[in-house]
Image (cartoon, rainbow, N blue to C red):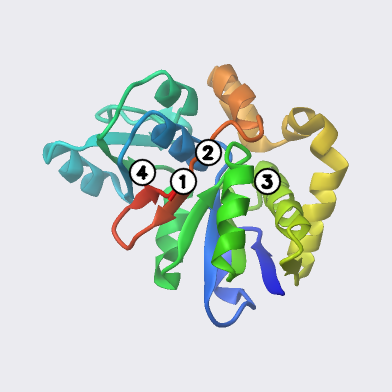
Amino acid sequence: MKSIEVILTPALFEFRITNGEYIVVVIDVLRATTAFCAAFESGIEIVIPVSGLNELLQYKNKGYLTAAEREGNKVDFADFGNSPTVFLQSTLKGKNLAYSTTNGTQAVEMAKNSGNIAVAAFANLRSITGWLNEQQKNVVILCSGWKNTFSLEDTLCAGALVETLEQTGQFSHICDASETALTLWKSSKNELQEAAKKASHYQRLVKLGQHDDLRHCFLINTSKAVPVWDGVAFRNLSGK
């Protein structure tokens, strides 16, 4: 039986209890990991996570498409912000994308030393569960949160992933954080977006007028994408 551990904020990642080989699954529902899935659905070949805007600008100067947001707003020089619905309205087959966000890409940067990283959202819940089940490795779910603090929406998604993994019969959760996430998910899943509306970042995006994104980010299984880190970039392993 493989284990599932949930880390509720990046600030707690160094205190993880999982030993041996494991896969880190980064979640940033609003909106980075949802947007990663959408970018792959639009035809993007690779996504390179970038922690700083100076490095992102270097990628732009090399001819990469770029996506970036800070505080929920699109960075001026970037081709895209952090909107999954904008990616879904685009045709980007074969393009390479460098990406930087307030929370999601920072969590990815933190997880890089583990070697094995995938990303999850409500959008790709079924496909990422299937892929993780095939890997037969322990799973550490890292919630991106908001500037190292707890976020409701990422914890809800972590609970959904705990449930779907345990339903395979191959996984069991091992910590209070995973039990908390699972309990929160079970009590909220029948009215998911209503529960998410209580989240502070949800309300930030409401104020920014991101209503289409907010509707999309809480739809389940809209994407078959399986974004997995290869040491340089994320590639979509769906169907591979």
Q: What's the distance in space between the residues labelled 2 and 3, CA to CA?
A: 16 Å
Q: Nearer the viewer, mark 2 or mark 4?
A: 2
Residue at 60% x, 66% y is 140
| Sequence-wise first label, 3 or 4 | 4
Identify the residue under disc 1: 239
Task: State which tag comes first along the sequence, 4 or 1.
Answer: 4
Question: In the rendered image, which quarter is residue 126 located in?
Answer: top right
Q: CA distance from mark 4 to mark 1?
A: 27 Å
| Disc 2 residue type (three-letter) | Lys
Q: Are marks 1 and 2 in contact (CB under 8 Å)?
A: yes
Determine whether the residue tagged by mark 2 lies in a helix, strand or loop.
Answer: loop
Which residue does the image show at 59% across and 69% down from the upper left?
Answer: 136
Lower sequence index among marks 2 and 3: 3
Quarter holding the N terminus is bottom right
Q: Which mark is residue 100?
A: 4
Residue appearing at x 79%, y 67% in the figure: 176
Categorize mark 3 by other alpha carbons within 10 Å: few (<14), some (14-19), many (20+). many
